[in-house]
Image (cartoon, rainbow, N blue to C red):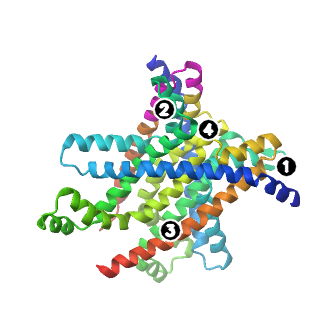
């Protein structure tokens, strides 16, 4: 037991270094993916049939393909059309595509949750399309969408560990490498797991609390 | 060439289906057990169930699979790739299904329990004949959604050497240097399979709700 603890102290810097990369990849994937998701969710409500079909097709492809396949498609597949990315950039791109697909559904349910009267009221006040979204619809939709978006962010942090298949030195690959160098897979992977639980566990609980709070708030005002 | 690739990657479809189906069954049963523990009257069991659910939802699936495959040694016993994948994905599914069941339990009218008690039905039959079937019907959509998530997560089994679609795709892309085409085809297979699951689930839902009086 003490032996394991000493090893953990020795490995800790490597794993935390990996964790920082995981967090960076996740954050960049979310930052680039969410606007895409919002655009897709607005596109899915468009009046033009072709825009609607296009956004639905893009969403379904982004959601229907496993992240692992997306990662390998970007990292191993795109070089054949002369787009070569580092494993870090590939991971960001793949996570961003996945984020766009999934968050578009979250944003869509948020947009649908806004009462129809709000749209009509905004129109009757003469707000233009952009102002209607910016000042009336989106602020309300965001309140509905925030808890699921945060929950999704946790899932993305977990998904970022798949980047170990494209040799990104994030936390899972650090733990795996320590395991294969020392043959102590059990303790190395266990430490990585504990670090994940230390981040995702409190975050999950916090999101649950936030969800109840936001829900209470909307009930009070309506 | 594309046709050849299609056939080479299609070899993995069966394994993907097996991993998905077995993990789903594991998760449906295990989720039931977790849900029972969580709603039990005991003081310890709910706490254990809650922490299990939190742990299995916090650890990335791929990390759990690696841990079970490389890290779990009980005497001379080691998991082979398929069972490690099924156990790992099954545990995560169980944690998520437990939450689905709990939501479904809330939607069952309290009168159902009262009525069962009033008729003097034993606890076991109350569950198997009255609450269980309703619970199953209410949690069907949640299960179907999760089955599709699971289908995609089954691709992680390739990292520990289960020969499913992602495994064959990676093999083929290294042999043929046609990585782009290979992974596009693999993605297409996953999309088609998830459409198939959605379709089966829809049919099952229709069939189940047909027998319900309104």
Report crowding for label 2: few under 14, some 14 to 19, many 20 or more residues within 10 A (C-alpha): many
Highlighted magenta segment, given as a residue range = B171-188
In the picture of the structure, the residue carrying the numbered disc 2 is B186
Question: Residue drawn 56% across and 55% down?
Answer: B93
Dot 4 and dot 2 residues touching (CB under 8 Å): no
Image disc number at residue B75? 1
Q: Is residue B178 magenta?
A: yes
Dot 1 and dot 4 residues touching (CB under 8 Å): no
| Disc on the earlier residue, 2 or 1 | 1
The Cα–Cα distance between marks 1 and 4, rounded to whole angstroms, is 30 Å
Is residue B61 visible from the viewing direction of this image?
no
Report crowding for label 4: few under 14, some 14 to 19, many 20 or more residues within 10 A (C-alpha): some
The Cα–Cα distance between marks 2 and 1, rounded to whole angstroms, is 38 Å
Is residue B188 visible from the viewing direction of this image?
yes
Q: Nearer the viewer, mark 4 or mark 2?
A: 4
The Cα–Cα distance between marks 4 and 3, rounded to whole angstroms, is 30 Å
The percent coordinates of residue B166 (x first, y second) are 55, 34
The Cα–Cα distance between marks 4 and 2, rounded to whole angstroms, is 16 Å
The percent coordinates of residue A111 (x first, y second) are 29, 60
Quarter that holds the N terminus of chain A: bottom right
Q: Is residue B88 magenta?
A: no
In the picture of the structure, the residue carrying the numbered disc 3 is A207
Is residue B58 found left or right of B104 in the rendered image? Answer: right
């Amino acid at each position: 037991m003490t032996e394991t603890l000493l090893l953990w102290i020795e490995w800790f810097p490597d794993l935390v270094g990996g964790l920082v990369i995981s967090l960076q990849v996740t954050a960049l994937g979310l930052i680039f993916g969410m606007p895409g998701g919002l655009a897709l969710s607005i596109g899915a409500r468009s009046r033009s049939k072709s825009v609607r079909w296009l956004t639905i097709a893009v969403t379904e492809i982004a959601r229907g393909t496993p992240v692992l396949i997306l990662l390998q498609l970007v990292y191993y597949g795109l070089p054949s059309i002369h787009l070569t990315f580092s494993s870090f950039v590939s991971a960001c791109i793949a996570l961003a595509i996945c984020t766009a697909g999934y968050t578009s559904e979250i944003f869509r349910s948020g947009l649908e949750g806004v009462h129809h009267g709000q749209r009509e009221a905004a129109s009757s006040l003469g707000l233009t399309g952009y102002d209607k979204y910016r000042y009336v619809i989106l602020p309300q939709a965001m309140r509905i969408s925030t808890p699921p978006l945060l929950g999704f962010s946790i899932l993305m942090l977990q998904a970022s560990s798949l980047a170990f298949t494209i040799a990104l030195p994030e936390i899972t690959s650090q733990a795996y490498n320590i395991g294969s160098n020392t043959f102590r897979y059990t303790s190395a992977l266990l430490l990585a797991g504990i670090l994940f639980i230390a981040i995702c566990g409190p975050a999950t609980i916090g999101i649950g609390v936030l969800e109840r709070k936001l829900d209470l708030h909307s009930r009070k005002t309506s | 060439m594309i046709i050849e690739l299609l056939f080479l990657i299609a070899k993995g479809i069966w394994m993907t289906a097996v991993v998905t189906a077995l993990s789903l069954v594991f998760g449906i049963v295990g989720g039931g057990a977790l849900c029972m523990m969580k709603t039990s009257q005991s003081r310890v069991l709910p706490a254990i169930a809650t922490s299990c659910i939190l742990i299995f939802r916090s650890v990335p699936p791929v990390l759990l699979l690696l841990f079970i495959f490389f890290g779990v040694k009980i005497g001379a016993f080691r998991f082979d790739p398929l069972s490690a994948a099924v156990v790992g994905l099954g545990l995560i599914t169980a944690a998520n299904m437990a939450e689905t069941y709990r939501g479904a339990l809330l939607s069952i009218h309290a009168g159902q329990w009262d009525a069962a008690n009033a008729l003097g039905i034993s606890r076991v039959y109350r569950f198997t004949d009255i609450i269980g079937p309703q619970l199953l019907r209410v949690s069907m959509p949640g299960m179907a959604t999760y089955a599709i998530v699971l289908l995609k997560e089954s691709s992680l089994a390739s990292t520990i050497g289960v020969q499913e679609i992602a495994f064959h795709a990676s093999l083929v892309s290294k042999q043929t240097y046609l990585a782009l085409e290979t992974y596009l085809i693999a993605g297409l297979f996953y999309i088609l399979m998830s459409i198939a699951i959605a379709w089966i689930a829809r049919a099952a839902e229709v069939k189940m709700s047909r027998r319900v009086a309104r």
